[in-house]
């Protein structure tokens, strides 16, 4: 039975998906919350937030992502980073999944990926769980109700946590699978209830499609000066580096917190909402994000709460350190209504350095910016991916390797061209450890990070005195108002200077070893900026 509002020529039956139970099309938030509670998928929390758990999977499963290998993708996919699946294996997976779905109820959301109508992707999300429909309704962009009558999906995503893949039959790694077919314009997600897979699958699509249109897809947050979209800044960084926290600055307008495009028209958000980490979240440090956890229809994922009072415990990581909340962008008071900004004036690369070596901020030349963009150094933080139990130093090229279907040089050259064409100051910001490595030092004070970013964005940092870092070659400010001078020189924060030097040499060596893979594909100026 069909329920809700849908283009009558674009029902699931018209796509060949038949024999289902009830299908609920484009339910809005109250109906989705009601359905999720009635179906026992979670509980209504304080303020009407929806409290749920995702079971075994509390983070992404990047090793279970597959792309169908075909003539269309053979020469365009970065196969070293994207596991291949044979077309016939995908067909079997699709047929078996549809057979599993027969007689069951499903929720459909027709949504836009991208705030710029010129470059957006029209996506249909088919979910087994009502709250997944609520989640993706927050995270992508919602058409006007009248637009649903003519909505025609470019791509369809089907998410069925109750279906287990068969590696032998379906050509995948395990019984969990995220499979993408560019020929059939389908994405299939099975045996994981972690909601982040829904949005990341769409972003992976955009990351593949947009470069063909000379649009730079970016795993970044973005904001602009209040009342002045021309003064836009973008913040590259993997989960746990502070993208969401640092871009949600009350003194600036938030464009978005995770994925953006940079076209010749300017910057545009892919999303319509935010997916924020909530571990150790406090009303004092992050009042706006904290407030969303008690607002109607916010999805509160994998958080421990008091069974009687429903009070959330922001410090209890017994379920996962990757506890999160998903909410629409308009829950943040200073969020952009359009999701659009100008060409970035500042490109900020966030890293979480578990070695305790990098300074809290450094100024990068354009060539150094390309080097650090391709390197993508950070530390994966616990819970972000399955099996990560402590901060793990890693190099994730373009600050988003798991979501990059094309070779990194494609994105690096695009970014290089955009910076050259439109001009931008480039900065490397370390939100990781200081005074020692993980286990000995402490996290960089967020107040210091904010003060440094404010100085960079308002232009005052450009006039500061800088020193050249002997290990990494970039420029580091000597003194910034409101920040302890010692913090700006990481060696001074260590009790043992010789231990710092040894740690720095170790990290320099890691940079050098990692960058060798890109050397044949890059220009001479970037090679000259290489570390080590």
Image (cartoon, rainbow, N blue to C red):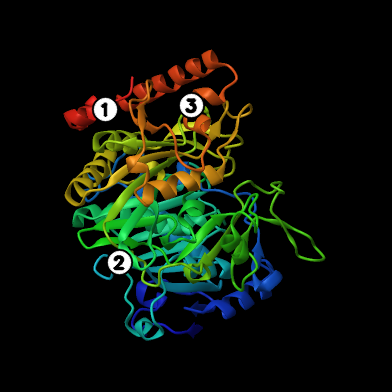
Helix, strand or loop status at disc 2: loop
Camera-nearest label, 1 or 2: 1
- Residue 252 image-quadrant placement: bottom left
Q: Where residue 414 sits in the image (x, y, percent)?
A: 22, 46
* Extreme residue in the right direction: 308
Above or below 505: residue 70? below
Mark with earlier residue (3, 2): 2
Can residue 451 be seen at all in this image of the molecule? yes
Q: Where residue 315 sits in the image (x, y, percent)?
A: 70, 49
Q: Which residue is mark 2?
A: 120
- Residue 229 image-quadrant placement: bottom left
Helix, strand or loop status at disc 1: loop
Q: Which residue is mark 3?
A: 357
Which residue corresponds to the image point at 65% horizontal and 47% vertical from the top-left?
320
Q: Where residue 329 sits in the image (x, y, percent)?
A: 47, 67
Relative to the observer, which residue lies in front, 144 or 406? Answer: 144
User: Is 291 positioned to the left or the right of 524 in the image?
Assistant: right
Q: Which residue is mark 1?
A: 529
Number of residues whose C-alpha sits closer than 10 Å to that of mark 3, classed few (under 14), some (14–19) or many (20 or more): many
Helix, strand or loop status at disc 3: loop
User: Is 282 positioned to the left or the right of 207 in the image?
Assistant: right
Q: Where residue 393 sits in the image (x, y, percent)?
A: 49, 31
Can residue 91 be seen at all in this image of the molecule? no
């Amino acid at each position: 039975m069909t329920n809700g509002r849908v283009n009558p020529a674009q029902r699931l039956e018209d796509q060949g998906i038949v024999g289902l139970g009830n299908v609920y099309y484009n339910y809005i938030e109250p109906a989705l919350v009601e359905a999720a509670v009635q179906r026992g998928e979670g509980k209504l929390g304080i303020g009407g937030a929806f409290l749920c758990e995702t079971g075994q999977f509390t983070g992404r499963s990047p090793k279970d992502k597959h792309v169908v290998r075909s003539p269309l993708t053979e020469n365009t996919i970065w196969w070293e980073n994207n596991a291949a699946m044979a077309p016939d294996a995908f067909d079997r997976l699709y047929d078996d999944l549809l057979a599993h779905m027969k007689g069951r109820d499903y929720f459909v959301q027709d949504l836009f990926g991208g705030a710029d109508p010129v470059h957006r992707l029209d996506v249909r999300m088919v979910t087994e769980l009502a709250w997944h429909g609520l989640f993706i309704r927050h995270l992508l962009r919602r058409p006007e109700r009248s637009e649903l009558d003519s909505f025609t999906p470019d791509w369809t995503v089907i998410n069925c946590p109750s279906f287990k893949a068969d590696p032998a039959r379906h050509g995948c790694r395990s019984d969990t699978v995220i499979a993408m077919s560019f020929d059939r314009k389908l994405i299939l997600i099975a045996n994981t209830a972690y909601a982040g897979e829904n949005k990341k699958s769409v972003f992976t699509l955009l990351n593949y499609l947009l470069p063909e249109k000379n649009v730079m897809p970016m795993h970044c947050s973005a904001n602009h000066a209040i009342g002045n979209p021309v003064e836009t800044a973008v913040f590259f960084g993997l989960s746990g580096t502070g993208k969401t926290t640092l871009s949600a600055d009350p003194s600036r307008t938030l464009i978005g917190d995770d994925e953006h495009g940079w076209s010749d028209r300017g910057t545009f958000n892919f999303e319509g909402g935010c997916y924020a980490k909530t571990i150790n979240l406090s009303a004092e440090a992050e009042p706006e994000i904290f407030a969303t956890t008690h607002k109607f229809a916010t999805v509160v994922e994998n958080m421990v709460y008091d069974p009687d009072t429903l009070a959330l415990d922001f410090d209890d990581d017994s379920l996962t350190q990757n506890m999160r909340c998903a909410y629409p962008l308009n829950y943040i008071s200073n969020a952009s209504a359009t999701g659009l900004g100008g060409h970035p004036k500042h490109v900020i690369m966030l890293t979480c350095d578990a070695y305790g070596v990098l300074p809290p901020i450094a100024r990068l030349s354009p060539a150094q910016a390309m080097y650090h963009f391709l390197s993508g150094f950070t530390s994966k933080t616990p819970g972000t991916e399955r099996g990560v139990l402590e901060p793990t130093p890693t190099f994730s090229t373009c600050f988003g390797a798991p979501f990059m279907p094309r070779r990194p040089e494609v994105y690096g050259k695009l970014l290089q061209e955009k910076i050259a064409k439109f001009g931008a100051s480039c900065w490397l910001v370390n939100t990781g450890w200081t005074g020692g490595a993980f286990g000995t030092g402490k996290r960089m004070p967020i107040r210091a990070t904010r003060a440094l970013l404010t100085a960079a964005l308002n232009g005052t940092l450009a006039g500061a005195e800088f020193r050249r870092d002997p290990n990494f070659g970039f420029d580091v400010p000597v003194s910034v108002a409101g920040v302890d001078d010692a913090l700006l020189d990481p060696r001074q924060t260590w009790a043992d200077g010789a231990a710092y030097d040894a740690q720095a040499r170790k990290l320099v060596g890691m940079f050098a070893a990692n960058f060798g893979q890109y050397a044949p594909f890059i220009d001479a100026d970037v090679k000259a900026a290489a570390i080590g």
